[in-house]
Image (cartoon, rainbow, N blue to C red):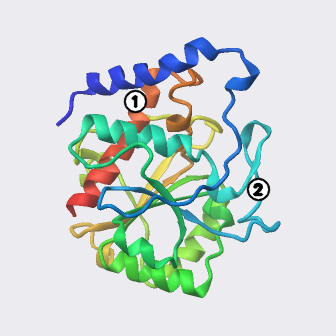
Amino acid sequence: MSSPAAVIALAAALGMAAVSTAGEASSAPVPHQQAANPTYNGQVAFVRLRYGTDTGDLGGDGMFGRGRRDPMWSHDTPRAETNFLRIMQELTSVWTTPDYHLIMTADDPELFRYPVAYIVEVGFWHPTESEVLSLRTWLMKGGFLIVDDHRGDHQINFLAQMKRVLPGSDFKVLDGTTEIFDSFYSIPDPYSLVPPYERELPPVYLGIFENNDPARRLMVIANYNQDLAEYWEFSDYGYYPIDVSNDAYKFGVNYVIYALTH
């Protein structure tokens, strides 16, 4: 198990870049532009699920914080995954590199090469029948889905869409005794991590277990009223305290390690 001090040291190193650029207009992250996915090479990748059409629907085109306009699925990319994969590379034995992140739709056959996928802003997520079937098959074959950055009444649509993906499945509230919160780092009280914004909404961690049995594999984890990637994206900008960003990284590391070992 890695030392928490190592997370602090690396997050501090990431944060050094912000010191020299603080207060400069050019220091704000630029809007996302999708690049070609790297070629599969066996490494553990950060796979972000894309949805919508980019032609004006809410999935394809939505307002992002700090005045930028980007697709809803793209919030915090690519800086969040780049920073997160650097943490994974430095603090675990997982074979990955900071630039090994991909964007694909849920019905892309390439998804079946990767055990972990990530999706955000699921209040605006309306998967096609093809995406529903593919995501269901991927999950049943051992895939692990991380759902981040959604809050309030956005959960209504998300729960409805997950009923399409996994009919008969039920979300269960997770607490610090759930195995995923002790898969690498010990996180005895996951609810102690405050959300980066809209803090009047308490975070809730929800999970779907195989056959609705908490003794079996966790297939989906949803960070409701929480946004871990917001902390990851800006961990080297000084927007948030280092210790809080460290804690957000621990969640992500635990999620990936759990997925790779179950």
Q: Residue 125's quadrant in the figure?
A: bottom right
For the C terminus, which image quadrant? Answer: bottom left
Classify 10 Å Cα crowding around label 1: few (below 14), some (14-19), many (20 and above): many
Reading the image, the residue beneath label 2 is 62
Percent coordinates x, y for residue 104 in the rendering: 54, 67
Mark yes or no: residue 208 visible.
no
Look at label 1 and name its amino acid.
Asn
Look at label 2 and name its amino acid.
Gly
Name which residue lies at 48% across and 50% down.
204
Is 213 above or below relative to 232? below
Q: In whole angstroms, how far apart are the C-alphas of marks 2 and 1?
A: 29 Å
Count of marks overlaid on the render? 2
Q: Are marks 2 and 1 in contact (CB under 8 Å)?
A: no
Reading the image, the residue beneath label 1 is 246
Is label 2 in a helix, a strand or a loop? Answer: strand
Classify 10 Å Cα crowding around label 2: few (below 14), some (14-19), many (20 and above): many
Is 37 above or below relative to 126? above
Percent coordinates x, y for residue 26 in the rendering: 72, 25
Viewer-closest of 174 and 4: 4
Mark yes or no: residue 15 visible.
yes
Percent coordinates x, y for residue 116 in the rendering: 38, 62
Q: Earlier in the sequence, mark 2 or mark 1?
A: 2
Name which residue lies at 66% across and 34% down.
29
Is 77 above or below relative to 134? above
Name which residue lies at 25% across and 48% down.
94
Q: Residue 154's quadrant in the figure?
A: bottom right
